[in-house]
Amino acid sequence: MGCCNSQPVDPPVSKGNQGRLRADSSNISKGNFVRTTKGLVRDHFEILKTIGSGGFGTVFKVIDKRTGLERAIKEIPKSKLGPSSEKQMLLEVELLKEMDHPNILKLFEVIESDLCYYIVSELLTGGELFDKVLKDMRFSEKIAAKYIHDIVTAINYCHQKNIVHRDLKPENLLLLNNNPNAPLKVIDFGISQKLAPGSKLTTAIGTLYYMAPEVFSGTYDEKCDIWSSGVILYLMLSGRPPFIGNTEVEVLKKIRAGQPEMTKGIWPSISEDAKDLIRKMICVDSASRFSASDVLNHRWIKQHISGEIEDNPINTQAFEQLNKFRSQSKLEKSILTFITAQVSTPSEESDLVNLFKQLDKNGDGRLSIKEISDGSAILGLGSQLDVMEIMKNCDSDGSGFIDYTEFLTAATTWNKVIQKEELQRAFKLYDEGGDGQLSLSELRDCIPGIEDSEWSKFLSEADKDGNGVISLEEFKQYLTDKILNA
């Protein structure tokens, strides 16, 4: 089934989401380092192969010539974009820049040429959840709980930021890689929308099998994503969608009735808790339907996720590193955040991802003071940690929470990173001229929001030979002196 569209238009996005993309440089956040440039893709990327195509563009597997890291690039010809679709595409990019969650596709860069837009993102090689469902025919409850937890924590994070996905389906849920415990990533925010609290969306859009009944009526909110997630959970447990028919009209009639069959076939072997959660997610009355937070607090999710956590105990070393993290200047924090956001690899992040999700008890995709304090208590580190000091040092954007990239930046063992190839990768991304030297203008372009006085101080301290540019060794020595010896 394709997308169903009608004429009513959603509330307009704010002016900040319109037009060309600009980074907010007032605070240090992951989105500040997602650069939008004009030029040719071949200048920095080698295309390896085509990995997908759709109505608006083609997706390629590429390698970044500057860092040697594999990425995915979506090529979107401008000739296929009308004014409204270009605006929606730019909104999708803006939303992805804003999001910072381990279960949401990571955006790295946007390149605009005369003919195309190129969206550079992390490469997901594990395939679609839909393919895994077909291959396995049905999941065990434990596996289904893991994936629905991944999905709903991502959606809960989106809803906290007033973002409605609107097209959750197995095809838009990809596995990071082929490892058995690979995390799920939510992709394709192409029809997502910002929704002010108390407002309603009006455009009937999505993929029929997964659309909530109120969407067809043209008055709905973020809970449409919960219905879609419930349909996905039903599909994972049974191998078939809850509402099927010979025609779209027949499917729509069953969706509006909203009574998924859970008595025949495999359903007697499924736990009552799992079926109870499905009923509360696939609930015709959206006011009574579970929120994302309700789902994460349901007994079935808590039982199964607690089992997963027991298999992956909290990483004490990473937690202690969080407590030790000190970065005195905005520039130093910006450099470390850039490295974390742009050049760290999934294998380097995997242990820290597990720790982050274990600490994030309410599943909102960020860590509060209480969650940090509770995590330290579990490890018996409570008296050794100054939680307020951790928050002060790690909360780079001043939100009052530790976001995902802020956590990775603080919990990383930087003495290893600075001596390894990650630093060289970052250096090459800064080095736009490709001459092996960093000029002040190159650094300014990569790191927004730094005062002239701080740049002058950086140059005087890092430029050991006084030639006005920074070499890789000078860059490495500066970070070693400032971060490792702090």
Image (spheres, helix red, strand yellow):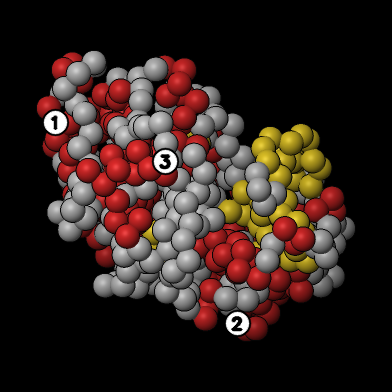
Query: On the rendered structure, is 331 left or right of 277?
Result: right
Residue 256: % across, % down: 26, 47
Between discs 1 and 3, the one toward the N terminus: 3
Picture coordinates of residue 291 (x, y %)?
A: 22, 53
| Tag in front: 3 or 2 | 3
Q: Residue at x 30, y 43 (%)?
A: 253
Q: Residues within 10 Å of mark 1 (few under 14, many from 20)?
A: some
- Which residue is denoted by mark 1 in the rendering? 273
| Residue at the image position 81 percent from the left and 72 percent from the top | 468
- Residue 88 visible, this angle: yes
Residue identified by numbered label 2: 451
Residue 26 vertical position relative to residue 107 in the rendered view, above or below: below
Q: Which residue is mark 3?
A: 248
Left or right of 157, for residue 345: right
Disc 2: CA contacts within 10 A as few (<14), some (14-19) or many (>=20) = few
SS of the residue under disc 1: helix
C-alpha distance separating marks 1 and 3: 31 Å
Asked which quadrant contains residue 83, the reply is bottom right
Mark toward the start of the polypeptide (2 vs 1): 1
Q: Earlier in the sequence, mark 3 or mark 2?
A: 3
- In the image, 205 versus 250, the foreground residue is 250
Mark 3 neighbour class, 10 Å CA radius: few under 14, some 14 to 19, many 20 or more:
few
Q: Is residue 38 left or right of residue 426?
A: right
Residue 112 drawn above or below residue 309: below
Q: CA distance from mark 2 to mark 1?
A: 55 Å
Q: Which residue is depicted at the point 62% across and 49% down? A: 121
Front disc: 2 or 1: 1
Q: Which mark is residue 353?
A: none
Residue type at the position of mark 3: Glu
Cα distance in 3D space between marks 3 and 2: 59 Å
Residue lying furthest right in this view? 435
